[in-house]
Image: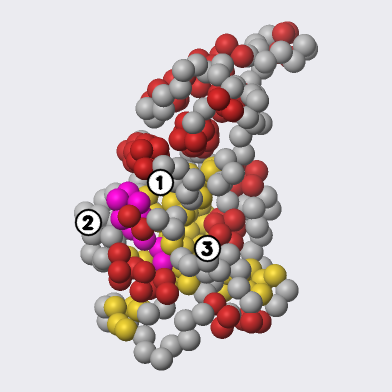
Amino acid sequence: MTGVDGRDAPLEPVLSARALVKRFGRVTAIDGSDFDLMPGEVLAVVGDNGAGKSSLIKALSGALVPDEGEIRVDGRPVRFHGPLDARRHGIETVYQDLALAPAQDVASNLFLGRERRRPGVLGRVFRLLDTRGMRAEAERVLGELGIGVRSMSQPVETLSGGQRQGVAVARAAAFGTRVVIMDEPTAALGVAESAKVLDLIGRIRDRGLPVVLISHNMPHVFEIADRIHVHRLGRRVALVSPAERTMNEVVGLITGALRVGADGELEEVRDAVRTGLTRTGGGTAE
């Protein structure tokens, strides 16, 4: 974008948060965390178990209401009271359990909760579903993303793990107009199917839709991510580029062995307490 002075104006984050806080009794799951997702990027969110990254993502997707702080979509403050609020702002989330109906077919799962009715009196009065239209649209969406299944009428329970992940991602890509959030999409997949999912994430990015990727798999993160959000003890401790940092350096930031100094360079932390038990109230949260 070009400003009035002829220079490129800075890009506005598609999704951002400032000073988010979420407490569960004496446990502080999110402790003043910031977040920034830029247009057209894959942002990986990494952190150890108990770092609070899942709570952060739940807040950004409407599954959890923060106690303090602000969330913005396209620079405008929003307040999500549930996942439907996030969906209305174009934010779709693919959780680890995929939220698929195994006995239903591919097209039905793609339109799960958003079923289309047939036009005219058949849909309006008799409430008949537009099965043919939904299957045609499902075939188009899966084809654009390169997801291969035998038929749109095929039950999801007959698909491989990678194909099921593809259906869940296709659903998010079909209805997410601003952001797609993916929680550990390759955790239960083999090497070949993981590669297909990473390719799928790249295809979504190439369509201009930014992706938030939560993952413990550092090779996958370094393969697909444009930037890495490092989460530790409930807050963002670093935002780094995989082109400029090594896996060992990112792991050091995750564990607390390294930190970002005042000059922006990484420095070793000596004699530091590196356990999540230092969190407020003596507890941790994922």
Task: Name the residue nearer the viewer: 144 or 1.
Answer: 144
Q: Residue at x 58, y 65 (%)?
A: 286
Closer to viewer: mark 2 or mark 3: 3
Residue at the outermost right position: 125
Residue 223 magenta:
yes
Label 1 amino acid?
A: Pro
Q: Position of residue 100 (x, y in %)?
A: 61, 34
Q: Is residue 213 shown in magenta? A: no
2 or 3: tag closer to the N-terminus:
2
Name the residue located 50 percent from the left edge and 16 percent from the top edge. 151
Q: Residue at x 26, y 65 (%)?
A: 246
Q: Residues within 10 Å of mark 1 (few under 14, many from 20)?
A: many
Q: Pick the residue in front: 76 or 235.
A: 235
Please say whether residue 168 is visible from this viewpoint.
yes
Mark 2 touching mark 1, by CB under 8 A?
Answer: no
Crowd tier of the residue under label 3, counting other residues whose Cα lies within 10 Å: few below 14, some 14–19, many 20 or above: many
The kind of residue tagged 3 is Lys
Circle 2 Cα neighbour tier, 10 Å, few/some/many (<14 / 14–19 / ≥20):
few
Residue 223: % across, % down: 30, 51
**What residue is shown with label 1?**
210
- The residue that mark 3 highlights is 53
Q: Gap in Å between the C-alphas at discs 1 and 3?
A: 18 Å
**Residue furthest out toward the bottom:** 271
- From what the image shows, is residue 252 above or below residue 95? below
Label 2: element kind? loop
In terms of sequence position, does the residue under pointer 2 or pointer 1 come before the other?
Answer: 2
Residue situated in front as seen by the camera: 25 or 218: 218
The quadrant holding residue 230 is bottom left
Q: In the structure shown, which secondary structural element does the residue marked by tag 1 occupy?
A: loop
The residue range painted magenta reads 220-230
Query: Which is nearer the N-term, disc 1 or disc 3?
Result: 3
